């Protein structure tokens, strides 16, 4: 499975060009801002969405939002995962683990 994360100080986000491609490609009703802003933090969009991953791979740096450096990380399909954002905005993917108290 491929997952998009931010790999730079700043914050996760997509460019307007990437979002326009995404919303045109996805015909399902999905919540999105209108008009589409120049940059968008991507809230509510699944980081492992195959359409988003494809767009980031296609556009490269042109898909990055303001202060973002997007990176695609590939993990095994059967992993339960979550994204951790350090205080600077750099993200990493962590595997879910069980915890008992």
Image (cartoon, rainbow, N blue to C red):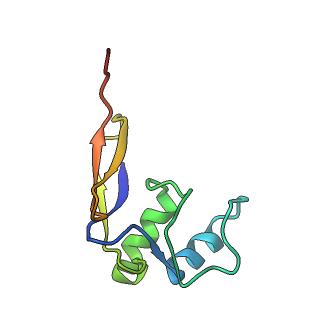
The residue drawn where x is 44% and y is 53% is 48
Is 19 left or right of 34, judged from the image as shown?
left
Q: Quadrant of residue 79?
A: top left
Residue 90 position within the rendered picture, expressed as x and y whole percent measured from the top left = 27, 62
Q: Quadrant of the C terminus?
A: top left
Residue 20, x across and y down, in percent: 59, 78
Q: Which is more toward the observer, 80 or 24?
A: 80
Residue drawn at the location 63% of the way across and 70% of the way down? 23
Pick the residue in front: 3 or 65. 65
Residue 94, quarter of the rendered image: top left
* Percent x, y of residue 8: 26, 70
Q: Is residue 75 visible?
A: no
Q: Nearer the viewer, residue 88 or 84?
A: 88
In screen coordinates, is 6 left or right of 15? left
Residue at the (55%, 75%) spot, across then down: 19
Q: Residue at 33% of width from left, 72% of height from top?
A: 10
Q: Is residue 93 above or below residue 98?
A: below
Q: Residue furthest toward the right?
A: 29
Quarter of the rendering containing residue 36:
bottom right
- What is the count of numbered marks? 0
Q: Is residue 25 left or right of residue 97?
A: right
Q: Is residue 29 something one can see in this rendering?
A: yes
């Amino acid at each position: 499975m491929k997952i998009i994360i931010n790999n730079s100080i700043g914050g996760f986000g997509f460019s307007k060009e990437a979002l326009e491609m995404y919303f045109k490609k996805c015909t399902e009703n999905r919540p999105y801002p209108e008009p589409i802003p120049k940059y968008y933090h991507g809230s509510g969009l699944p980081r492992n969405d195959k359409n988003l991953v494809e767009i980031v791979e296609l556009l490269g740096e042109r898909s990055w939002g303001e202060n973002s450096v997007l990176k695609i990380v590939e993990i095994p399909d059967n992993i339960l995962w979550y994204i951790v954002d350090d205080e600077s905005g750099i993200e990493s993917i962590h595997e879910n683990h069980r915890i008992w108290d």
